[in-house]
Image: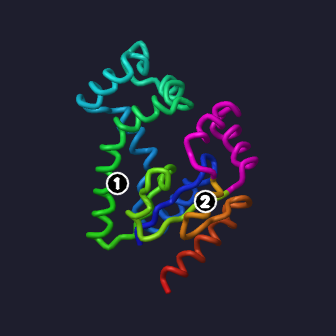
Amino acid sequence: MILGITGAIGGGKSLISDYFFRRGWRVFNADGVCRSLWQSPGPAMMEQIRRDFGGTLFDDAGKFDRAKIADAVFGDPEAMKKWLAILYPALNAALEKEIRLCRETGKNGAFEIPLLFENHYETKFDATMAVWAGRALRHLRLREKRHLDEKEIFRREALQMPEEKKLELADYAVINTASVAFAETQLEMFESHINL
């Protein structure tokens, strides 16, 4: 099973991925791949970033400044398009490589991709799963765990389709509004279903 996992920011995608990792699945985290790309970009990527953004995304030591990246791209659709055009070729190559590895080895794979439907990746997977938590709960988690303020949360949410739409498009859903055990019970039911 090659499963694409998505959901709104703060919904609990990582909880789902962690569950599958503990069950022996290969796990791919698109945000983690993108983070590693901009933390250690190759020469071609650095050249494109400097060409498209100048020196605005770097700190005084010449390293990427995460806060400056967020300020530059979140809330500015044109800047986000440029940023994604830089990252996505490498992300897509990593994604395709991992899918191929899962298929060749016969391993189940869980692919955590926040913008799965927005980027029309659903055709790459055997099935898709959306995690849903509701706006108020997600915002509370984001304030408490990631220390984001409401302005920043809304800015990031604007880049994603509504979580209700993701739920509608997905093949499977996990409602993540209670305990971890509640979410894991749903995942156990999913595993039982696909193993029938």
Residue 169 locus on image (x, y percent)? 56, 63
Residue at left offset 61%, top offset 41%: 157
Crowding near the residue tagged with mark 2, few <14, some 14–19, many ≥20 C-alpha atoms within 10 Å: many
Residue at left offset 60%, top offset 40%: 158
Q: Badge 2 is on which residue?
A: 131
Distance from disc 1 to disc 2, alpha carbons, whole Å, reads 20 Å
Q: Which residues are magenta?
A: 133-162
> How are the colours assigned in the image?
rainbow
Residue at left offset 51%, top offset 60%: 5
Residue 17 locus on image (x, y percent)? 51, 59
Q: Badge 1 is on which residue?
A: 95
The residue at the far top in this view is: 60
Snapshot quadrant of residue 51: top left
Q: Is residue 146 magenta?
A: yes
Circle 1: residue type: Leu
Residue at left offset 33%, top offset 33%: 40
The residue at the far front in this view is: 78
Residue 26 locus on image (x, y percent)? 40, 62
Q: Between 138 and 147, which is closer to the camera in this rendering? A: 138
